[in-house]
Each structure stands twice: as structure tokens, then as C-alpha cells.
Amino acid sequence: MPDIIQLLPDNIANQIAAGEVIQRPASAVKELLENAVDAGADEVKLIINDAGKALVQVIDNGKGMSIIDARMAFERHATSKIRNIDDLFQIRTMGFRGEALASIAAVAQVELKTKRAEDETGTYIEIDNSVVKKQEPIAFNNGTSIAMKNLFFNVPARRNFLKSNTAELRHIVDEFTRVAMAFPGIFFSLTSNGQEVFHLDKGTLKQRIVQILGNSYNAKLVSVEEQTDYLNIYGFVGKPETAKKTRGDQYFFVNNRFIKSAYLNHAIMNAFEELIAKDSFPMYALFIDLNPEHLDINVHPTKQEIKFDDEKIIYAFVQSAVKHALAQFSITPTLDFELDASIQHLDAVSKPLTEEKKSSAAASSLYQAFTQKNQAHFIDNKSDLRHWKDFYEPPLEQRPAAPAPLHSTEQKPLVKDEPAHSNNLLQLHASYIVVQNDQGYLLIHQQNAHERILYERFVNALKGKPVAAQQSLFPSTIELAAADAVLLQELLPDLQLLGYQLEPFGNNTFVIQATPADLDQGNEKAAVEKMLEQYKHFSVDIRFTKKEKLLRSLALQQSIKAGTMLSQKEMHTITEALFACETPNTTPNGKPTYMLFRKDEMDKMFGR
């Protein structure tokens, strides 16, 4: 029998190894940006075409490379940063293993242009499938330009696993913002298909955060800064009112390297305990500086997962620093002075206070006790407080007729749990609708029911029955963070069928031309922002398609919330629409829309 174990050819071995480092265009973006930072650049430009599938190019004004270094940079494990094993625990640069360029060259066509300040000419190298095709001197500015073209052209199976352009662009934006946020003293730009998405001027960390995450954070950041002999912590957290339903705006850096750590995230969540809702996530951009001897960053190919030699100390410091910052700035949830819409319709608000009522109120002992000097302690139960209702209730003859009883004999027999057509429905706690049927009564949860109604309407819209749109009399513009702008661009075709008409207006801005006809006018911007936030909340669930996530997020966002007062007409509309649904008994997420309380079971409870 012949021997069967053989060494892999270099190009195949490189392609396999590259799979650990370069998983998608965003992986190359991260590695190339970090190399530019390590080169001492203060200007870094990222250019991509076709979401990085056709081109990823990074141009920097760093120190450049010599002819020999330029050629050696593409050899696997060729590095200028490691000489012996001890150096692994003194790493202060972003890259160090010498894998990135070799991996990129194994799965793409690469063009390198580089020049040092002390050299008269630069170097041009062209590499195809790990093979150097051309090397020659060129005229070039000081610095380096690396262009990666046609990613995975030689591994078509892996190219087929790439997502849509908008999805891949979102990953690129994520990697770009992580590097850009860590180095606010460096100018960064991102240009996609000829359009500039980011233009980040040099500045302070706070300025960089606002540049990336949007102007809404400008006055809502709390400074965090603690210095100890063991480590330093600095950065910003968002005030409690900026907390969102998604984790998006959360950044942790250790020695300027972005990391993912559920453990340290838990420390921050504990610091925000009782300041934000349980299902909300605070914004933060926090930096930890400590001696590299206390951590190991060489535990994962992407270097986003690291190990500390004592995690508990780091946890305690992070939690303490954030708590101290929040306490120092006297952070408490802000008061919302906007009145609930239902309050505006109450009699006490909508009806004028007549002279007769003014006189009646002024004559009361309660009024006099509070308006005359030294009288407050004389309030007693002998006053006319027992008549307090009379002041708010209209005279008996002016009150509306009592609603017809729910057990009217004119009700029609019903099928299953469907409600009878009662003239008057009852709302409980501004959240539930009570309606009788021949088996007892139904308790309908108004928000859950409306969510089911909207969901099925949206499903039908995508099947060819578009939701009616209402044109805005004065179209408004909405400016988004770049990542959200990319996401919205991806959703535009489906949103059009669902009643939203938005047009790109350049520089991450959109014009809202129309919204669904039954959506309150004047809240278009808030509706779009909440829709995006809800969509991102659903995006973590891999069970759903993009369209399914959109339908569920819109249904949840637009549904009538618990706590909203409803008119008889609105309650009837919800009830009838619910039982016209194909699946009336649950929300899209499986929550019940109503409960049936049977008359025979209630009779037993009362011994009847």
C-alpha cells in the first residue's frame, strides 16, 4: 500500500489558514486599518466597491515600507513586532502575528504601493493567489496603499456564502467605526461606491463618538475617568434616557483594541441597575489601559476575545468607575413633561372652568385652607371633602346615558370564542377590552390584539396589497448614524409596500415623503427611528428572514400600547379586526391576544 499522507501545496494551505482570519470583506478592512494605525499614520482612507467584494483599499500616510519589507510583508508569519515568546506579553500594537497580508493575498488579488520618506521612489507589488506577478519601482507619496480586489475569486464556494451587499456593508461599517473610535487623533474616511459615508476629522474622543453615533448624544454623555496603579479607565457612558432596546452602541477597548466581553458588559449593566429598564441597554465607549503582562490577546484569530489574568479585579474597577461617574453627575431619569394623549381628552382638561365652578371651588373649605395664611393644619374630615366628586362630575341631567348591558338578549349566537356584537364594550386599566359572548366573556389585550392585526395586514401588503400611504404636507428629513443609514437603505423596497416612502438625500440623510395613512402625522421621524431600533432588536434572532423581522418590528412598534384610552369605535374596530385574522388567538411572537372566561366556570365559583 502506498503512503497516503502528503503535505498540502502552499497555496491550498494558505487558503485554509486564511479562512480563520479573512471570513468576509470586513475582516480584511479590520486588518488593513489596524496596519495603517501601526504605521503611525494620522490620515487613513478606506475605499470599497461592491461592499468590499470587488475592492477594499486602504490608503495611509504612515511610514511606508522598504523594497524588502514590502515583499516580506506577504509571507506568512513575517512580522516586525515579535522576536521571542516574551514579546507576546508586551504587545502594544494592533497587529503582530504576520497573518493578515498573507491571508488576504491567498484569497484575493492584491496591489501594494508604498514609500518611505527617506526613499526616492516607492515600490509596487502585484500578487495573485499568493504568487507575486509584478514588482517594480514607482513614484508614490509617503505612506502605503493596499488594494484587495475580487475577494474569494479563487474560492468560489466561500464567495457564495457572503451575504447581500447591504449586509456586508454593515459589517464593514462596524469594523471601521471600532478602529476609528479607538483613535480619535487620526483622520478617517470611508467611501463606498464613490460616495463618502464617513468623514471623521481629528478631535477629542467625545467629538469622535458624536461623529460616529450621531448628534443626539452630544449633550447626553457622562465622562468616566478613574486612574489606579493597576489600570486606568476612561471614556463615556450615555445618560439613562439614551438606553435602547438593542446593544448596538456599546464599545469596549483594552489598550485601544476593541474587544467583546459579556463579563465586563455585565459590570456596566449592574452599574446602571434601577436607572434603566431591565430590557434596555446603555450606551458606552470605555477604554481600559493596563500592562500587557496582565492579559493575553492571542486567544482568537480576530483578537476580539482576550483573557485577563484576574477578571474579577477588572470587573470591580469597571463597575465602580461607571457608578462613580453616574453619581458624580447626579444622573437620574429625566422627567417627561409631555402629557399623555388620553389625559388631554378628559373632561377636566377639555372643558372650560366656568365662573360658577370657580366660585364653587373658592368657597370650599379645602380651597380656603390652602390659600389663607396659617390654615393648612386646620384641614379636617368635617369639611365638605365628602362632596369632592361633585366638582368634577356634571349634573345628573347632563351625564350620558348608561351603556347598554353586555348581556343584551339581541346578541347573535357565535362560533368558538368570537365576541358578540355588543353595543358597548368596557375598557379596563386602559389596557384590556371586555366583551361578552354566549359562553361568558372575553378579556382582550389591546396591544397584543393590535399587533396581530397589523402583522397580518403587513403580510398581505408584501403579497400585493400595499398599505395606504399618506403624503406628508411638509416632508421631513431624518439624519441617521452611518450604520443605521445602510440598514434603512436595505429595507427601503419592503418599506415602500408597507406605506413608508423615503428617499435618500445624501450624507446618511433621508427625506420622509409619506408614512402609513393610519400613523399619527407629525411623528414621522420618531416612527422611523423606533422602527429601526425594533428591527435591530429582532435581528439577533437567526430564525427569521429579513422580511419577517421587518414585519414583526413594525407590528410591535405601531401597535396601540397598553395604557392608551380607547373610544367605543376604536374598541369595536380592534375586536372585529382581530377575529377577522387568520390566527386571532396569538401575537406573531406567541403571546395570547385574549382570554376566555366561561360563564359555567364562574357560576361554579359562586356556588351556582
Image: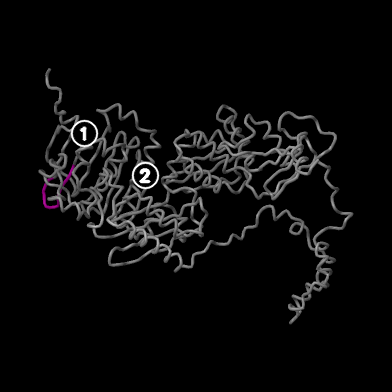
Residue pictured at 29% horizontal, 63% vertical: 231
Quadrant in the picture for residue 466: top right
**Front residue of 50 and 433:** 433
- Would residue 17 be counted in the magenta stretch? no
**Front residue of 48 and 4:** 4
Residue pictured at 50% horizontal, 33% vertical: 547
> Residues at badges 2 and 1 in contact (C-beta under 8 Å)?
no
> In the current view of this chain or complex, which residue is farthest to the bottom?
374
Q: How many marks?
A: 2
Q: Where in the figure is residue 175, as x and y percent of width and height?
A: 33, 45
The circle on residue 173 is: 2
Q: Where in the figure is residue 378, as x and y percent of width and height?
A: 77, 78
Quadrant in the picture for residue 542: top left
Q: Is residue 128 visible?
A: no
Residue 109 vertical position relative to residue 348 in the rendered view, above or below: above
Q: Where in the figure is residue 300, as x and y percent of width and height?
A: 27, 44
Q: Amino acid at mark 1?
A: Ala
Secondary structure of the residue carrying numbered label 1 = helix
Q: Write down the residue under mark 1.
A: 106
Give the magenta range.
113-121
> In the current view of this chain or complex, which residue is farthest to the top?
1
